[in-house]
Amino acid sequence: MIRLTIWYENVQEKGILDKNIFQESFPEEEEKKFAGFLAKTAEEMKKVYPDGLGKTLEDHFKAKEDISVKLVTLDMPGCGITDELLENTDVLMWWSHIAQHAVPDELAEKIHQRVLQGMGLIVLHSGHLCKPLKLLLGTSCTLRWREGDFERVWTTAPTHPIAQGIPPMFELETEEMYGEFFDIPKPDDVIFTGWFRGGEVFRSGCTWTRGYGKIFYFQPGHETNPTYHNEYILKILDNAVHWTAPDRIHDKPDCIHAEAPEIRK
Amino acid sequence: MIRLTIWYENVQEKGILDKNIFQESFPEEEEKKFAGFLAKTAEEMKKVYPDGLGKTLEDHFKAKEDISVKLVTLDMPGCGITDELLENTDVLMWWSHIAQHAVPDELAEKIHQRVLQGMGLIVLHSGHLCKPLKLLLGTSCTLRWREGDFERVWTTAPTHPIAQGIPPMFELETEEMYGEFFDIPKPDDVIFTGWFRGGEVFRSGCTWTRGYGKIFYFQPGHETNPTYHNEYILKILDNAVHWTAPDRIHDKPDCIHAEAPEIRK
Amino acid sequence: MIRLTIWYENVQEKGILDKNIFQESFPEEEEKKFAGFLAKTAEEMKKVYPDGLGKTLEDHFKAKEDISVKLVTLDMPGCGITDELLENTDVLMWWSHIAQHAVPDELAEKIHQRVLQGMGLIVLHSGHLCKPLKLLLGTSCTLRWREGDFERVWTTAPTHPIAQGIPPMFELETEEMYGEFFDIPKPDDVIFTGWFRGGEVFRSGCTWTRGYGKIFYFQPGHETNPTYHNEYILKILDNAVHWTAPDRIHDKPDCIHAEAPEIRK
Amino acid sequence: MIRLTIWYENVQEKGILDKNIFQESFPEEEEKKFAGFLAKTAEEMKKVYPDGLGKTLEDHFKAKEDISVKLVTLDMPGCGITDELLENTDVLMWWSHIAQHAVPDELAEKIHQRVLQGMGLIVLHSGHLCKPLKLLLGTSCTLRWREGDFERVWTTAPTHPIAQGIPPMFELETEEMYGEFFDIPKPDDVIFTGWFRGGEVFRSGCTWTRGYGKIFYFQPGHETNPTYHNEYILKILDNAVHWTAPDRIHDKPDCIHAEAPEIRK
C-alpha cells in the first residue's frame, strides 16, 4: 500500500483574496483587479472541476486498491503537513501556483530533507516554482509561459516505467504553454516533451534522483483546463506514484568516520 | 583574461580558536581539546605550506598569463566577498572546512545566484559541505572519511577538457580518504575516481551545470598533505579554471510571458 | 589548425540514376519514377546551392583561419576516404541521404574505429542513418519525417560550447520535419530541440562521446532548402568543428594485463 | 512470468581444445599450452561449480516462482539460440569468455535487433567483449585485468531497483580485477563500483537503454571463483532480471512518413 499525500494550494478555487495569504498591501486599484481575477478563476474552475481540483485528484486515487490517499491544503493548520503526516507519506504530490510564498521556509526544508531520505515527490504544473522543488534542484526553475494554447505531448523515453501505457503522442485541447529555456538541472530522463501550437517546446515530464528520493515533474495541469480528466494524464500520474514510491525511508545522511577495514593481504 | 577569485577559509592555519567564528560556548574540556587540535594543525600545515595553503594556490595562478587571481579569506570584511568582487569574478575557487557555518546564509545565496547566472565554481576537498555547493546541488553532500590514507586517482572520463594532460592514473602518497556513498546528484561527468588503500572508492572529480554556471568538485586537498604541490593536481585545477569560466554572465533568470508568435502558415 | 574533412554523398545533385550506386534492378516503371525524382531534386538544389551543397560547406570553412578543409565525395576512388586521409583528419563532417548503402561496411568500420581513437564526427541531417553513426550508437536511429515544414530551433543547453552565439530560438522558413521518437541512445547533451509547424518535436542537436571521440548530430540541412546559408546554422557548425576536434589521437584501445602494483603499506 | 534464457559459453568447463571452436591453427607448442590451460581451468571450475557454472545459474532461477529459465550453450545447434527461442525470451543472460569469436555475426546481429525491440540483456563478467554487447554499445569495451584479486563492491546508486537489498558494500574474497579505463558509453547508472586490493577501481554494475531494451553489465563472475554462490551477487542478478524484463516487445523500429496532422487553430 503506497501512502500518497496530495498537497493542494486551494487558493484560486475559493475565489477570495485571503489577507492571511497575501499579506503585502496592494495599491487599491491593483487589489481590486487581483480580487477580480481570483473570482473569475474560481468561476471557471467550477466548470471544469465541480468538486474541486484537489478533490478530483483525491477521488481518482481513492479508487486504486494499492494506494491510500490523503488530501491536504494550504489553509489547514501547519499548511496541512504535520511532522506525523510527513513521516507517514511515501509519495507527496504537489500542486501550487499563486501562493508559493505562503509555504514557510521551515516546512519546505522539512519536505526537502524527507525527499533526501527517500520520500517520492511529484510536482505538478505551476508547482515548478514551489519551494521544496527549488531546494532540491538548486536552479531557478523559470520558463516561458502563455495561457490557452494547444499541446501535443510526445513520449521521448518510451521504456521508462512512467511511460507505460502511454501512446507515442497525445493531445490536450487547451493547456497552458510552458516553454524552453526551462532552467532545471539535466534530468535523469525526459520522458515527455511538449509541443505547443504557438511555437514552443518543453521538457514536460522530467525525473531526478536526489539523495534516496525520486522526483517527477509534470507540466500539464492548468487550473482552468480539464487536464486531470484526461485518461493519459491520470495514467501518467498513476505510473509516477508507483515509480517515485520508495522501498524504504533511509536515515538522515551524515558524514561517517570510517575506520580502515582489515583488507585481506 | 579569466578573473579567478580564490576563497580560502584560513582558520586552521592561524591555529587559534577565534571566538568570532566559533561562537557557541564549548564545555571547557572540549574547548581546550579543540584549541589544541587547531594549534597542532597549524604547525603541520606550516611544514607543507610554509606560505599558507591559500597563498600557495594564489601564487600558482599568478604565474598564468591568461588568469588574474585574487585571494580572499573568511576573516576579511564581508567574508572577503563584496558584491563588487562577485560581479568581477569569472570563476570562484573555494576551500573551506571547519568554519562552513561562518559563511552567512545571505552570502551563500548570493554566490548560488551568481553561479546560476554563469560564474564558474570550483569546490575543493572539504568544501563539499560548503553552503553554496549544497544550495546548488540540493543534496546533503555527505560521505565517508578517514585521514592519512594513500590514494590513486583514476581518470574515468579521459576526453573531458579537465582531464587533458593527466595520465590514466596518478598517486598521492598521503591524502584524506573520502568514500562512497557520496550523496550528490548524478554528475554530468565523473572525470576522476579515487581508490584508497583502506578499501574505499570515490567519485573524486565531478562536474555539474546549474543554470548557466559550470561546477567542478575535486576531492584531493587535505590541509596537512602536500597535495597542492603535485603537478597533476595543479594541472587539473588549471584545466578546471578554463572549463568553468563562462563566455558571459546572463541576466537573472525569470519567468517570461511569451506572446504567441506569428508562425508562418 | 583543425583538419576538417567533409564527406558529401553528391548523388542527388548530379540528378542521374547511377547504376554503380543503385545496383539493384528496379521494375521499369519505378526506375523511371526514381530517375525523375533525382532530376527534379537536382534542379531544385541548383536554385539553393548553385555551387553545390558540398562546395557551399567547403567554401564556408575555407574562410576560417584555424581550419583546413577537404571535400570528398562518394564518387571518388575509395568513396573519397583513403586510409591516409583518415589518419590526417581531426574532424569528419558527414552528409548522406539516399546512398547510405553504397558506403562499404569495411570503410564504415574504419571510420567507427577512428572515432573511438579520437576523431571528431559531425553527422548532418539525413546522415542519421549513415553506417558509421549506426555503428557508433548501436540503435536504429529511425524517426518520423515529412518534407516542407517550418521549424523553430530552441536552444535547450545554452551553456554548451556548441550553443555559443546562438539565440534562445531561431527559425528556418522551410526544413524537413524530423520528429520523435528518435531511436538514439540518451545523448550527453540535447543542445537544440526542434519545433515543427506540423505538430512534432525533435532532439535536433545531440552530442555523444564514444571511446575517445566526440560526436555531434544536427538535424537541419535538407538538400532542397537553403539551410546552409543560415548564419546560425553555420555558427553551430563552426562551434561543432571546434568542440569535436580532439586534443590527440589515441592508440587503438585494447585489454591490458595489469601487474599488481606495489602499493604503499 | 519472465522468460529468462541463460546463454553459457561452456568451453573452459569441458577442458578440451575443440577444433570446431578454435579453428585457427596454432603453433604446436602454443596449442599444447592452451590445451593445458583449458584442462587446468576445467579442474578448478569443478571445485567451485561441481554442477557447472551454467547449471548453477539455471538452478538458482529455477527456484523462482515468477521466472521460467532455459539454459543454452555454444555447443548446441545454432549456438543454442534459434529464432523461436529468441522470440520467446524476455531476458537474455550472457556469460562468455574465450570463444566470443565463435558466435556468428549473424546471430549477434539478431540478438542486437531483439534488444532494440525490447528484450532485456544481462551481460556477465568476461562477456564485456561479446559481440551483441559491442554492437549495442558501439565502443571497444576494453579494460585492464588481472586474476586473483580481492574485491569490495560499493553501491553507488542505492535507489536503483537493481540495488534493492544490497548493503552499501560487500566483499568478494577472490575475483578477477577489471579496472578503468573501461571503454564504454556513459552508463545511465553506475550502480556498483568495484575496489580491488591491487589498486584499481571499476564501474562494475552499469545500465544502458538501447532502443526499447534495457541492458545491465555486471563485472564479478570469474569462472574459477565461487562468485555465483554469493547471496548478494545472486540478489543483484534477481533484481536485474526483473529490471531488464520488458513490458512488451515492440515492432522493429522504422522511419515513418508522417502526414501533417490537423492541428486545432
Image (tube, coloured by chain):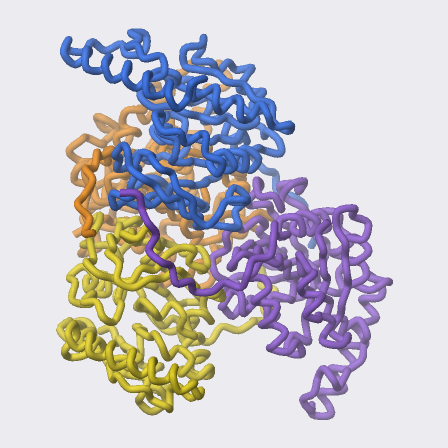
Chain colours: A yellow, B purple, C blue, D orange
Q: Is C262 in front, or is D108? A: D108
Residue A185, horizontal then vertical, whole percent: 46, 59
**B200, above or below B29, in the image:** above
| Residue ID at (26%, 76%) | A3
Q: Is residue B146 left or right of residue B56?
A: left
Label total for image: 0
**D27, above or below B52, in the image:** above
Visible residue check, residue C150: yes
The quadrant in which residue A26 appears is bottom left
Q: Is C188 in front, or is B195? A: C188
**D126, above or below B204, in the image:** above
Visible residue check, residue D219: no
The quadrant in which residue B81 appears is bottom right
| Quarter of the figure that contains the N terminus of chain A | bottom left
**D265, above or below A18, in the image:** above
| Residue ID at (59%, 29%) | C249
Q: Is residue A2 left or right of residue D96?
A: left
Q: Is residue A216 left or right of residue D117?
A: right
The quadrant in which residue B122 appears is bottom right
Residue C51, horizontal then vertical, whole percent: 45, 17
Residue C131, horizontal then vertical, whole percent: 37, 25
Residue C223, horizontal then vertical, whole percent: 36, 25
